[in-house]
Image (tube, rainbow, N blue to C red):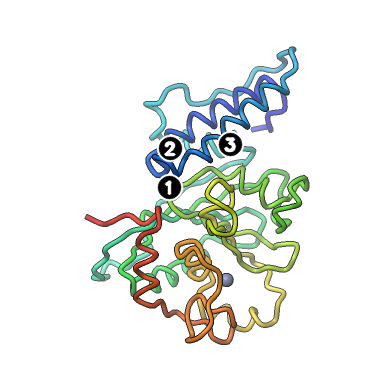
């Protein structure tokens, strides 16, 4: 699908995204927490209306027309396309073996989003996330439901400008994250690089706020240019580490070796009982029946 450029299509796109997003993520963002995000969507919609010129040009591609169609995977695909991505592919995955008998008390939904052209592949991503799932077992937290999504990015962007201040750059992390459809849980973006050399990052509330497009997202790169991380990436799980920033809503720790330690020599798979309890209170953590 070609990007929508006509202003009347843009208005329609905004209405559709606002409407579909509210229905898809509404339950996860019910109540006070959704107000700032909702306000930003409404504001964005009215800004678009303000910018309209008066001459409708090409007809818009058709999108979902009623709320009864929204559970259809085709319509989830449509949200990605409306936001400028191409050929989204979805697959439900199970990160656990059939013999897993862990007593889970909570679940966190995860979307593993592979940006095509980044150098990542499906098998590697799922295998790496299985390791993260293994680490969260110690807390009784199950990463489920899990989806693998691969998608072609707008303008082929695979290298992301990390600074949230550089919002006008085409590859701005804010722009890119804004185009990623909201999830009920955590989304991990698998990209090629960050322009500042970061190899992984997260979007906790304390750093960006709940209305930020970075909130509840994590990012991993294929490029690892820092020798320190090249050496240890296979020995711990950056996927689990970045998730824990979001779930614990904190930065790095010092003291005993830990999954969230600030010194790469002290990074390991350990989460304390206290950390586990805090994570279970995160809005994306659901009590299991
Ligand atoms: Zn970190």
Residue 124 point in image, percent of width and height: 53, 67
According to the image, label 1 marks what residue? 184
**Residue shown at 63% from the left, 47% from the top:** 152
For label 3, count other residues whose C-alpha is less than 10 Å away and answer few (under 14), some (14-19) or many (20+): few
Location of the C terminus (image quadrant) = bottom left
Query: Which of pointers 2 and 3 indicates the residue nearer the eye?
Result: 3
With 24 as the anchor, is 160 left or right in this view? right
**Which residue lies most toward the left here?**
289
**Which residue lies most toward the top here?**
55
Marks 2 and 3 in Cβ contact (< 8 Å) = no
**Quadrant observed for ligand 1 in the rendered image:** bottom right
- Does dot 1 land on a helix, a strand or a loop? loop
With 214 as the anchor, is 126 left or right in this view? left
Would you place residue 108 above or below residue 52 in this image? below
Marks 2 and 1 in Cβ contact (< 8 Å) = yes
Residue 41 point in image, percent of width and height: 57, 34
**Residue shown at 70% from the left, 62% from the top:** 194
Residue 76 point in image, percent of width and height: 48, 38
**Residue shown at 78% from the left, 48% from the top:** 169
With 50 as the anchor, is 183 left or right in this view? left
According to the image, label 2 marks what residue? 24
**Residue shown at 61% from the left, 37% from the top:** 83
Q: Earlier in the sequence, mark 2 or mark 1?
A: 2
Q: Is residue 167 visible?
A: yes
Would you place residue 276 above or below residue 287 in this image? below
Q: Earlier in the sequence, mark 1 or mark 3?
A: 3
Q: How far is the residue under mark 2 from the one under mark 3?
A: 17 Å
Marks 1 and 3 in Cβ contact (< 8 Å) = no
Q: Nearer the viewer, residue 179 or 58?
A: 179
- Does dot 2 land on a helix, a strand or a loop? helix
Query: Which of pointers 1 and 3 indicates the residue nearer the eye?
Result: 3
According to the image, label 3 marks what residue? 40
């Amino acid at each position: 699908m070609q990007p929508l450029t006509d202003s009347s299509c843009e208005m329609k796109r905004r209405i559709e995204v606002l409407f579909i997003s509210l229905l898809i993520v509404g339950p996860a963002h019910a109540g006070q927490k959704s107000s700032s995000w909702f306000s930003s969507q409404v504001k964005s919609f009215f800004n678009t209306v303000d910018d309209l010129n008066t001459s409708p040009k090409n007809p818009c591609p058709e999108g979902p027309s009623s709320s009864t169609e929204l559970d259809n995977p085709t319509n989830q695909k449509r949200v990605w396309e409306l936001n400028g991505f191409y050929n989204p592919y979805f697959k439900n995955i199970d990160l656990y073996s059939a013999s897993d008998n862990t007593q889970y008390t909570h679940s966190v939904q995860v979307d593993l989003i592979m940006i095509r052209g980044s150098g990542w592949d499906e098998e590697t991503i799922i295998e790496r996330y299985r390791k993260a799932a293994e680490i969260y077992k110690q807390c009784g937290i199950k990463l489920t439901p899990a989806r693998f999504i691969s998608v072609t990015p707008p303008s082929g962007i695979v290298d992301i400008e990390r600074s949230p201040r550089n919002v006008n750059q085409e590859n701005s992390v804010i722009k890119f994250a804004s185009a990623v459809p909201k999830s009920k849980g955590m989304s991990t973006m698998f990209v090629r690089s960050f322009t500042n050399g970061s190899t992984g990052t997260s979007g906790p509330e304390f750093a960006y706020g709940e209305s930020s497009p970075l909130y509840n997202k994590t990012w991993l790169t294929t490029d690892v240019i820092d020798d320190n991380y090249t050496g240890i990436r296979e020995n711990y799980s950056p996927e689990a580490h970045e998730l824990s920033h979001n779930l614990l809503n904190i930065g790095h720790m010092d003291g005993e070796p830990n999954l969230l330690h600030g010194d790469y020599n002290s990074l390991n798979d350990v989460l304390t009982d206290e950390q586990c309890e805090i994570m279970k209170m995160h809005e994306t953590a659901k009590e299991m029946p």
